[in-house]
Each structure stands twice: as structure tokens, then as C-alpha cells.
Amino acid sequence: MYIENSGSWIALAIILTSILTAWALNYSAPKVRVFGTLLAALGCFAVAAWFFFFVTSSGMLENPKPNQTPLDSAKPSLLWAQALISLASGLFLLFIARGQSKSKSKSKSKSKSNNILVLSSVNEQDRYGRVSRLLHWVIAILVLSLIPMGIFASMIPEGTEYRLAYYVAHKSLGVSVFFLVLFRLAWNSFSKRPTLSDSLTAKERKLAHGAHITLYFMMLAIPVTGYMMTSYHGYGTFFFMWELPPLWGESDIYLVWGAIHKYLSWMSVSMVFGDVWFNAKYANTTAHSERVK
């Protein structure tokens, strides 16, 4: 069924912004990569501003929809934590952009080609190609957008004016992530992933492999469980301006699927932080700077 709702336009704007940011972060020219880092910082500040100027004044933190799982009581605290982390991340990215700009200026007096990022479309033996990098950053930005949006949407009581817009945007982004992850898996089978650094121990290699598989599982399982929860609750699933009707009759089993959906979402947050930590360590231990350039 075709619908008109502002949530579909919000979802489209977030996707286009994520694509632009991912493209800029992996562009060959250094000044465009600086622009990409600034866009990423702006995205973090946007999340923080949304929370501090809208969420805190909406009344949802004090009077949310009744809890369905024990974890629901932690939602206000989680939104506060994510807003503060977004603000700190934005400031950190501004610091990174400043360092990139200085590095670009120094390279002008030496060799201009030193900071040019030359990437092939496919993956290479020692680093990811342009397609994998674009998919990685687009998916990452969308997932990080989905988490606070999903938390807040689930707190909005029935009958609130903007409730549908949040659900349309959240579900549209969730379906988009699901298909992007499937495409990423198909691309990995076509273009073999780079080998891990020789500096990693056997244990670290096993952890990296396990974390990689777990992240892919979660990125597929979270949209699927969200769809099951929505369908068994008697609601349709939105994909921008289209509403897909539920495939099953309404049932209280939606509470089970909802709990799985929520707990997997929180687990994915910890997995993302673990992935960031591992990659930071990897970047600092690798003997080949081109692998992380």
C-alpha cells in the first residue's frame, strides 16, 4: 500500500547523507576526505542536538510508553549516554579533521601524491577496495542512526502525532540495512576479503573472525526480528512510501520477538565498540600503513 509520510523523506535524507559521507571519506583527494570527516562530525552533532533540543523537551523521558521488558526502563539512560557519546565523537572527529588538514598542508611542500588514496573497486590482498569501504561506512552510519531512533520510537505512546513518522523512518532504514548487508555478503563472495595482519596473534585472529561473523549475524537478525515483532503485533512494515501488510495474524508472541530484537540491538552496540577497539589496535600494530589509509 502506498502512503505519504514525512518519515519516508527523513529516511531517504539519512541514506543520501550516509552515502555522501562514505563517498567523501574514501575519495582520492585529501581535501575531500577532510570534508567527509567533517560530515561525520556534523552527523554526530545532529544526533546530540536532536536529543538535547527535541527529546528532552518531548516529555518522553519522564512519561514513556509502558515498559514491555525489564530493559525498557533503561531507555532514558541509554538515550542520555548515546547523546553524550555522539557529542564527544563529534568533537573527536573535528580534532581528526584538523589533523587531516594539517597533514594535507604539509604534503603540499613535499610530494602531493603521498596523501592521494588510490583504491581499486575490488578488494586487494592487503586492504579493502572502494566498494567494500563504501558499503561498510554506509551500513555503519545507518546502524548508528537506527539505534537512538528505535529507542525513542518505542517510547512514544499510541496516538502521538509524530509516532508514525518515527516508525516509518526506522523501519525503512532497517529494511535498507538488511538488503545492504545481503549485498555486502554477495560482494565478499565475489571479491575476497583482505588477509589479517601478520602482527596479530592466533587468538586475535580467531576473535576477529568470530566478531566478524557475529556482526553480520546481528545485522541480519535485528531487522528480521523487528519484522517478526511488527507482523505478530498486527502492524505493517514500512519501506519508504510503501507499507507491507503483516504476513501472520496478531499474536502475543510479538513480545518474544520484541525482546529478542531489543536485546540483540544492545548486544550489537557492544560489538560495535569492540570492533572499533580492535581496528584501532590493528591500525597501530600493522607494519603496512597502506592497509589502513
Image (spheres, rainbow, N blue to C red):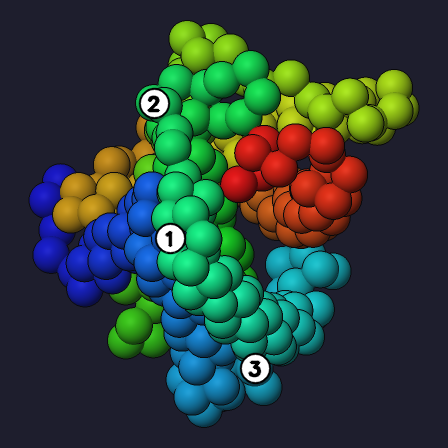
Which numbered disc, 1 or 2, marks the residue closer to the eye? 1
282 left or right of 158?
right
Asked if 216 appears above or below 173 in the picture, the reply is: above
Looking at the rendered structure, the secondary structure element under dot 2 is loop
In front here: 241 or 88?
88
| Label 1: how many Cα within 10 Å (few below 14, some 14–19, many 20+) | many
Q: Kindly identify the amino acid type of the residue bearing the numbered disc 3.
A: Leu
Q: CA distance from mark 1 to mark 2?
A: 19 Å
Q: Which residue is label 1 attached to?
A: 30
The answer to which image quadrant residue 10 occupies is bottom left
Question: Which residue corresponds to mark 3?
Answer: 61
Residue drawn 10% across and 44% down? 2
For label 3, the crowd category at 10 Å Cα-Cα, with few meaning under 14, some 14 to 19 and many 20 or more, is: some
Residue annotated with mark 2: 121
Is any atom of residue 221 visible in this view? no
Q: Earlier in the sequence, mark 1 or mark 2?
A: 1
| Mark 3–mark 1 CB contact (< 8 Å) | no
Taking the spot 60% from the left edge, 27% from the top edge, the residue there is 217
Q: In the rendered view, does 85 fall on the left or right side of 51?
A: right
Asked if 289 appears above or below 160 in the picture, the reply is: above
**How far apart are the alpha carbons under marks 3 and 1?**
42 Å
Q: Nearer the viewer, residue 25 or 229?
A: 25
Whether residues under marks 1 and 2 lie with C-beta atoms below 8 angstroms apart, the answer is: no
In the rendered image, the quadrant that contains the N terminus is: top left
166 or 80: nearer the eye? Answer: 80
Q: Between label 3 and label 1, give the one nearer the viewer.
A: 1
